[in-house]
Image (cartoon, grey):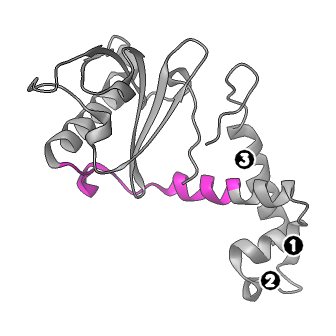
Amino acid sequence: MLTIFWPASSDPSILPVCAVSAPQTASNAFDLLDLPVAVSVLRDARHREHVVIADGPRHIRLEARGASLLDGPVRLAYDLADFRKLRVRLHTLSRLEALVRLRRLPAGLYGRDTLAARWLLALAAWEMKQAGASQIEIAIALFGAAQIDGDSMDRMRKRVARLIALAKRRMNVTYGGQFAVV
């Protein structure tokens, strides 16, 4: 699984949390390692943990400070102070509550994400470009040879160029000069 991390300052859906160690028996403890879904964690230079919890195409992103979520059960305090980001962060909190209660991320809490599919295409196009593929080769790999003929070749080249430009824009978010991909 490819995981890309970016800071909460660039995405209002990332829920900032403060973690405090909790006993295993605490009823309100959150144990990241006990979840039956995929989890990726990146610890940055300021000792914050950037967490992506994923169940197929559905995900939750947390930015944690305090105790490490990798060290076992914690109690979480949620930073909801920014009113401009409150609605989307409450939605993330609702998803986190459902995950803990149901042990899965229910599809009903996720709308159709058309941007994610486009971002995945952009990332794939970027990777192929970095490997030396031409725009036409990328178009064939992404959309199939049947989609490309003499009339559509220029249109497909432009479409691939737009995807690569999107990937470059998305990769402008850095961590100390480094783009974090796991």
Question: Considering depth in this image, is 132 or 125 the residue closer to the camera?
Answer: 132
30 up-or-down from 135: above or below: above
Q: Is residue 150 left or right of residue 8?
A: right
- The three-letter code of the residue at mark 1 reads Ile
Secondary structure under the numbered disc 2 in the rendered image: loop
Instruction: Using a 10 Å C-alpha cutoff, classify the residue at mark 1 as few (fewer than 14 neighbours), some (14 to 19) or many (20 or more).
Output: some
Rounded to the nearest whole Å, what is the CA distance between mark 2 and mark 3? 22 Å
Q: Are marks 2 and 1 in contact (CB under 8 Å)?
A: yes
Question: Considering depth in this image, is 128 or 114 the residue closer to the camera?
Answer: 128
Rounded to the nearest whole Å, what is the CA distance between mark 2 and mark 1? 8 Å
Marks 2 and 3, the one that precedes in the sequence: 2
Q: Which residue is mark 1?
A: 136
153 up-or-down from 165: above or below: below
Secondary structure under the numbered disc 1 in the rendered image: helix
103 up-or-down from 132: above or below: above
Magenta range is 103-123
Marks 2 and 1, the one that precedes in the sequence: 1
Q: Which residue is mark 3?
A: 166
| Horizontal and vertical percent position of residue 126 | 77, 54
Marks 1 and 3, the one that precedes in the sequence: 1
Rounded to the nearest whole Å, what is the CA distance between mark 1 and mark 3? 18 Å
Residue at image position (18%, 25%) is 29
Displayed quadrant of residue 80: top left
* Residue 148's disc number: 2
Query: Could you tell me which quadrant the N terminus lies in?
Result: bottom right
- The three-letter code of the residue at mark 2 reads Ile
| Horizontal and vertical percent position of residue 137 | 85, 73
